[in-house]
Image: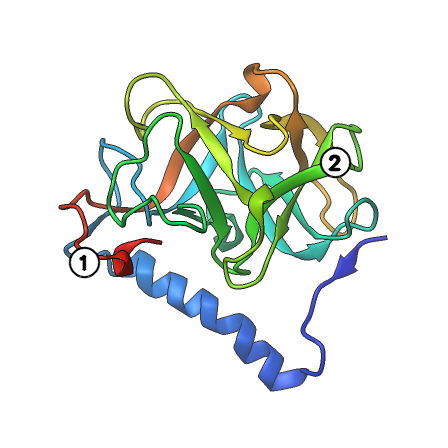
Amino acid sequence: MWCAGGRAGLSGPKLLGLRLWPLLGLLVLLGLPGRGAAKTGAGFVTCGSVLKLFNTHHRVRLHSHDIKYGSGSGQQSVTGVEASDDANSYWRIRGGADGGCPRGAPVRCGQAVRLTHVLTGKNLHTHHFPSPLSNNQEVSAFGEAGEGDELDLWTVRCSGEHWERGSAVRFQHVGTSVFLSVTGEQYGNPIRGQLEVHGMTSANTHNTWKAMEGIFIKPGPEPSGGHDEL
């Protein structure tokens, strides 16, 4: 069975308010890019950017939601969806717990990053649990308010020096070496039609991704202190 998530001790208007605040913040961010962000155009993917990731082979966007796996880890599920307008498909690019990803800095090929789900604050994560449909490695969303553990780190695999918005990349998990993948297995209720996302041991056509819709923080000068790191 699948489990709908929630916060213990909260119900009604208070719980609804907590869930609406991240959505309102996202709407403001996407509607008001300001001086330091760009919504379209060529260039690099940068630290602090908020974007959707598109699997180029299966044509779905990386997605999560407050629904937990009914098997395996029981953590928040991660799927692929066809819809381009779903707010639950936004992820923020961040460095590891020790920094290393200053706001606006282009993400380097070979750099380890965290992908934080904007609306739930959990990080893209994997571990040695089997995925529910394909029996590959389960991919989940884990942590609270953007803080999880060392299994939240993914290396950006791309050609050249930096991650370019128009180019396909792979995400290889630092801790277990699997690649973020989709192979087409489809869930039933309560997330009917969404595709399983999992980890695979080999690099292939199932694990190439492109940056799509989002707000891309413009590159700027190197920060003078630690406060600008995300």
Q: Which residue lies furthest to the right in this view?
A: 1
Q: Nearer the viewer, mark 2 or mark 1?
A: 2
* Residue at 33% from the left image edge and 44% from the top image edge: 101
* Residue at 52% from the left image edge and 59% from the top image edge: 121
- Where is residue 48 drawn, in percent x and y? 33, 50
Alpha carbon separation for disc pair 2 and 1: 42 Å
Residue 106 falls in image quadrant: top left
Q: Are there few (<14), some (14-19), or many (20+) residues within 10 Å of tag 1?
A: few
Residue hosting label 1: 34
- Where is residue 41 drawn, in percent x and y? 22, 35
Q: Quadrant of the C terminus?
A: bottom left
Residue type at tag 2 = His
Left or right, 74 with reference to 26: right
Residue type at tag 1 = Gly
Q: Which of 17 and 136 is in front in this view?
A: 136
In the rendered image of this protein, does residue 229 appear above or below residue 46?
below
Residue hosting label 2: 128
* Residue at 50% from the left image edge and 23% from the top image edge: 208
Q: Residue 202 carries which label?
A: none
In the rendered image of this protein, does residue 176 appear above or below residue 33?
above
* Residue at 60% from the left image edge and 42% from the top image edge: 151
In the rendered image of this protein, does residue 176 appear above or below residue 203?
below
Left or right, 230 with reference to 59: left
- Where is residue 219 drawn, in percent x and y? 19, 42
